[in-house]
Amino acid sequence: VARAWIDPKWAALLEDWVLAGHHGSMRFLAETLETRKAVSAWWPEARSVLCVAASYPPAAQAPPTEEGVWGRVSGHACGRDYHRAVSELLEDAVHEVQQLLGVSLDHRVCVDTAPVMERALALSCGLGRRGKNGCLMVEGVGSRVVLGEVFFSSHLEADPPLPGDSCEGCDRCVQACPTGALLGDGRMDAGRCLAYLSIEHKGLIPQKLASAMGDRVFGCDTCLDVCPRNEARRSDAGSEASSILQSLRPSDPKKIEEGWLCLTSLARLPTGELRRKLAPTGLERLTPSRLRRNLCIVCGNTSSRRARRVLEGLAKSRSNLVSRQARQALGDSSKGA
Ligand code: B12
Ligand code: SF4
Ligand code: SF4
């Protein structure tokens, strides 16, 4: 449990980060800066916050053996959309407590759904420590967790932050980042981060960064995959692991659960069907044209005739973004001819 209060050192850090332009084109971060710096600016009555971390297993590292061009999906986006899944869990928990106590609690649930510094709140009550990859690391669990909060207008006793540094001389994530986005002290230049480019960025992705995307079609897990603190969960890859999010996953769409999307099949889907297929998952956040843009990039990074045929089709897309990204990828991929 944390106080509904952002430590001024984290508020200042966020402000400096935005002023330095490290937020890339995520304008919503600059526009909500003042609100993020103080919980009271978002909800003046908030006094306490229950902070939770929901773990998820890593996505399968190898693509399925079936034929096709496969795109890698980050673990946090496999299966059911975590924003909805964790919000429902938290609402259910509050409901149960209210029933037990026979009271009505004035509260608000947030799972990446409100302009608050979720990592700062989790750090302040000792839910975990900060890694050099910027992520909150939970003792014995690692950083493959998503965060959620229940804000209350009542006072609850707050927990203290954890002492110590969990990185202890390690800098594997900083070295492994394919684009050098991690600055080494917990900060990142989001404009260079593949998670940002594939999920948040709306425009064309320049060829140098597109090449670095490799087979990633949604998000990037490299700085989580190399972290020794995440080793305990590595053997769970692609299995029916007993994590909170895994237990909430529906059986459809199967391949997204395993962490891979068949791009050759997706490329053939009309927009309406594409939307329907992705609606229950975290990939819903991508518009069909941004998903097709990412698909072009992965196909461009794949040396196969099949990938080239997909690109030739998408080069004729009515979406300016998709056709430009496809043409850029074709220009770069004489390799597949
Ligand atoms: C914008 C955003 C992004 C951006 C920018 C990420 C970033 N590092 O700032 C992009 C699109 C790149 C992104 C990527 C990912 N994201 Co994101 N993202 C957010 C969002 C909406 C805001 C984060 C923010 O304000 N960033 C600005 C920085 C300055 O603030 P901060 O991260 O809170 O800063 C803390 C630490 O990074 C650290 N720190 C940062 N800089 C420095 C510098 C110094 C000197 C020190 C001492 C400390 C320090 O301390 C700060 C204390 O709060 C949050 C949700 C939320 N509302 O908080 C989710 C959130 C941070 N993302 C999340 C996830 C899961 C991811 C990905 C793993 C998804 C993926 N696999 O593709 C990647 C991870 C990339 C990474 N290494 O951070 C989770 C993180 C869970 C965790 N274990 O920490 C969050 C909390 C969403 C959630 N509810 O679960 N994300
Ligand atoms: S998510 Fe990928 S690109 Fe972004 S900082 Fe981590 S390793 Fe680098
Ligand atoms: S890889 Fe090493 S430096 Fe990076 S977060 Fe994990 S322990 Fe810290």
Image (cartoon, helix red, strand yellow):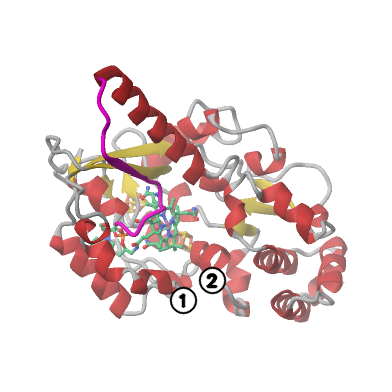
Q: Quadrant of residue 189?
A: bottom left
Residue 107 is covered by the magenta coloring: yes
Q: CA distance from mark 2 to mark 1?
A: 7 Å
Inspect the image, locate mark 2, and give the three-letter code of the amino acid beneath it: His
187 over 97 or under it: above or below: below
Residue 184 locus on image (x, y percent): 31, 65
Residue 286 locus on image (x, y percent): 61, 60
Task: Please indicate, yes or no, whether residue 261 appears anywhere in the rendered image.
Answer: no
Residue 38 locus on image (x, y percent): 20, 60
Residue range (magenta): 102-116
Inspect the image, locate mark 1, and give the three-letter code of the amino acid beneath it: Ser
Most frequent secondary structure within the magenta stretch: loop
**Residue that carries the numbered disc 1 in the rendered image:** 25
**Residue that carries the numbered disc 2 in the rendered image:** 201
Give the residue drawn at x 25%, y 26%. Answer: 103
Q: Callout 2: 10 Å neighbours few (<14), some, many (20+)?
A: some
265 over 246 or under it: above or below: below
288 over 97 or under it: above or below: below
Q: Is residue 228 left or right of residue 160?
A: right
Q: If the image is split into quadrants, where does the C terminus sit? A: bottom right
